[in-house]
Image (cartoon, helix red, strand yellow):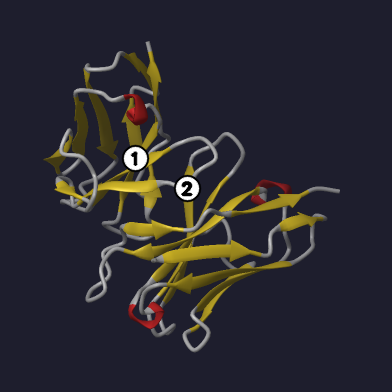
Amino acid sequence: DIQMTQSPSSVSASVGDRVTITCRASQGIRSWLAWYQQKPGKAPKLLMYAVSSLQSGVPSRFSGSGSGTDFTLTISGLQPEDFATYYCQQANSFPSTFGQGTKLEIK
Amino acid sequence: QVQLVESGGGLVKPGGSLRLSCAASGFTFSDYYMSWIRQAPGKGLEWISYISSSGDTIYYADSVKGRFTISRDNTKNSLYLQMNSLRAEDTAVYYCARDLSVVVPVGFMDVWGRGTTVTVSS
């Protein structure tokens, strides 16, 4: 199985800050990577897919980049509603696997 | 609106069985591949099973293979997960989710239900 490792596991930031979350795959996954946001007690929400494609309705302050094994999610100009846990997911091969999550907290 | 609603969760003893359902509405269910994903308390997301739009292609995670069975009824716009030989480690919130693409499945999930909680305990 492909292992997805996110860093950091948690990060504190302030409204207006720029935050970058990293996801590393244990083997190449081409562009088969997505990012999800999850708030407590809620289902995950798709933010980005195919590395850098923004899901409909997601604000443009979210962006994604990378290829092969190393990927990043960047949030530019943090808003109060962005404080949540973020997961990367690979869909290159079965079983699809998720990173362990990055909790974004308010500083 | 596009919606998925899970049901069927509950408390079950180790070794017991449970059948989860996921009712779809607001879209052409028969066009989409569907998945079940679970989340243990305080833990991350684990994809567990996937079924093609027609039901003829199915995948399972090793953690549930041989114990869980995914199925669907396109006439009822419903997805199912039959869970047998349940273990304490199966305790989780179970989500059903829709594949992003209708033409060729991509494995990314754009619509999720709210989840149903399964607790395996004696």
Q: Nearer the viewer, residue B51 or B3?
A: B3
Tell me which chain the residue with mark 2 is part of.
A
**Residue B72 spot, x, y in % from top left:** 51, 80
Please determine whether, in this image, residue A90 is positioned above or below residue B100: above
**Residue B122 spot, x, y in % from top left:** 86, 48
**Residue B32 spot, x, y in % from top left:** 35, 75
**Residue B37 spot, x, y in % from top left:** 49, 55
In this image, B37 relative to A30: left or right?
A: right
Q: Nearer the viewer, residue B50 or B6?
A: B6
In this image, A106 relative to A54: left or right?
A: right
- The local secondary structure at tag 2 comes to loop
Q: Which of marks 2 and 1 is nearer the N terminus?
A: 1
Q: Which residue is drawn at 21% across and 29% down?
A: A75
- Residue A95 seen in the current view: no
- Position of the C terminus of chain A by quadrant: top left
Q: What residue type is labelled 1?
A: Met
State the mark number for residue B83: none
Looking at this rendering, what residue extends furthest in the right direction? B122
Q: Which amino acid does label 2 sit on?
A: Ala
Q: Nearer the viewer, residue A47 or A22?
A: A47
Q: Mark 1 points at which residue?
A: A4
State the mark number for residue A43: 2
- The local secondary structure at tag 1 comes to strand
Please determine whether, in this image, residue B90 is positioned above or below residue A14: below
Q: How crowded is mark 2: few (under 14 residues within 10 Å), some or many (20 or more)?
A: many
Q: How crowded is mark 1: few (under 14 residues within 10 Å), some or many (20 or more)?
A: many
Disc nearest the viewer among 2 and 1: 2
Looking at this rendering, what residue extends furthest in the front direction? B1
Q: Mark 2 to mark 1: distance in Å?
A: 20 Å
Occupied quadrant, residue A99? top left
